[in-house]
Image (cartoon, grey):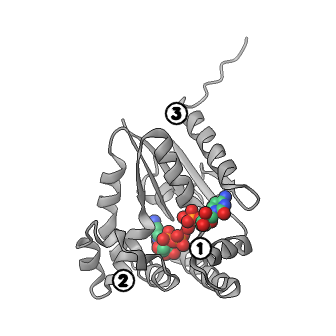
């Protein structure tokens, strides 16, 4: 059985950085599911058709990283038919041996609810805005407003809203270096790979 690591969290929390590092460490496949929604948003038009005609070339476009592409993604991601059209692709990706790491908003809650490790990566909104501003060379206040609007839309939508799965491990990276955040995630994955702890009574 492939080992699945589900990672969710708000914008610029560090989930992609952690997901890539976990995949490299364990030799697992990695899917940034946000790119599926960004590419679908960029295609516009019929949402279901756009979702079904995505190609791997679409996912490698650098313009998908912009704040505008993020907003377009979050608007299209609230449409239930768009989400439904992307479910099979994500589940097939997750089923690859020897394992897969998927990061997004609904991986632990909807796409892979049985994943043995679910991480919910978060950080304060100001810190996330500062990180994204540095990344895109953009203004921090503008980024803060953009992230807050997107987080609100993602959390309040009726279908697959952003929220931690009941059994997710919450990792707040506000005051963690990238190296420390990755080390904590690897430690959680090692623990989960050993299986659930069975406590036996000493008497
Ligand atoms: O995937 P997500 O949007 O959640 O975030 P990311 O792309 O992994 O990280 C956003 C930015 O924050 C990147 O520039 C990371 O290098 C940075 N980062 C950080 O400064 N400290 C961390 N603990 C994690 C990420
Ligand atoms: O990197 P960042 O966290 O800023 O965004 P992203 O992960 O690329 O996701 C862009 C948008 O796609 C999010 O704001 C969500 O609206 C949507 N998304 C989603 O609804 N479900 C996912 N599994 C992944 C992304």
Mark 2, ligand 2, within 8 Å: the answer is: no
- Mark closer to the observer (3, 2): 2
Residue 65 location, x and y as percent? 47, 76
The relative height of residue 162 versus residue 26 in the rendered view (above or below) is: below
- The alpha-carbon separation of the residues under discs 3 and 2 comes to 38 Å
Residue 128 location, x and y as percent? 67, 71
- Mark closer to the observer (1, 2): 1
> Which of the marked residues, 3 or 1, is nearer the chain's N terminus?
1
Residue 34 location, x and y as percent? 45, 68
The residue indicated by pointer 3 is 193
Residue at screen point 41% across, 75% down = 62
The relative height of residue 15 versus residue 135 in the rendered view (above or below) is: above
- The alpha-carbon separation of the residues under discs 1 and 2 comes to 21 Å
Q: Which quadrant is home to the N terminus?
A: top left
Disc 1 element: helix
- Left or right placement of residue 144 versus residue 47 in this view: right
- Please name whichever residue, 100 or 1, is drawn nearer the observer in this view of the structure: 100
The residue indicated by pointer 2 is 42
Residue 124 location, x and y as percent? 73, 69
> Which of the marked residues, 3 or 2, is nearer the chain's N terminus?
2
The residue indicated by pointer 1 is 135
Which picture quadrant has residue 53?
bottom left
Q: Does any portion of residue 115 appear in the rendered image?
A: no
Q: Using a 10 Å C-alpha cutoff, classify the residue at mark 1 as few (fewer than 14 neighbours), some (14 to 19) or many (20 or more).
A: few
Q: Which quadrant is home to the C terminus?
A: top right
- Numbered label attached to residue 152: none
> Which of the marked residues, 1 or 2, is nearer the chain's N terminus?
2
Which picture quadrant has residue 144?
bottom right
Mark 1, ligand 1, within 8 Å: the answer is: yes
- Mark closer to the observer (3, 1): 1
Disc 2 element: helix
């Amino acid at each position: 059985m492939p080992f699945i690591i589900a990672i969710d969290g708000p914008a610029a929390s560090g989930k992609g950085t952690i997901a890539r590092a976990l995949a490299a460490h364990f030799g697992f496949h990695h899917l940034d599911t946000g790119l599926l929604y960004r590419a679908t948003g960029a295609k516009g038009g019929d949402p279901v058709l756009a979702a079904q005609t995505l190609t791997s070339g679409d996912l490698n476009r650098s313009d998908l990283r912009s704040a505008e592409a993020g907003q377009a993604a979050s608007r299209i991601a609230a449409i239930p038919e768009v989400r439904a059209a992307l479910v099979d692709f994500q589940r097939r990706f997750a089923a690859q041996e020897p394992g897969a790491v998927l990061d997004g908003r609904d991986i632990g809650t909807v796409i892979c609810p049985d994943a043995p490790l679910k991480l919910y990566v978060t950080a304060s909104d100001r810190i996330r805005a500062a990180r994204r501003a540095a990344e895109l060379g953009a203004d921090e206040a503008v980024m803060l407003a953009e992230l807050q609007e997107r987080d609100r839309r993602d959390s309040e939508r009726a279908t697959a809203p952003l929220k931690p799965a009941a059994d997710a491990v919450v990792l707040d990276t506000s005051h963690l270096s990238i190296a420390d955040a990755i080390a904590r995630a690897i430690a959680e994955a090692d623990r989960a790979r050993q299986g659930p702890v069975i406590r036996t009574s000493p008497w």
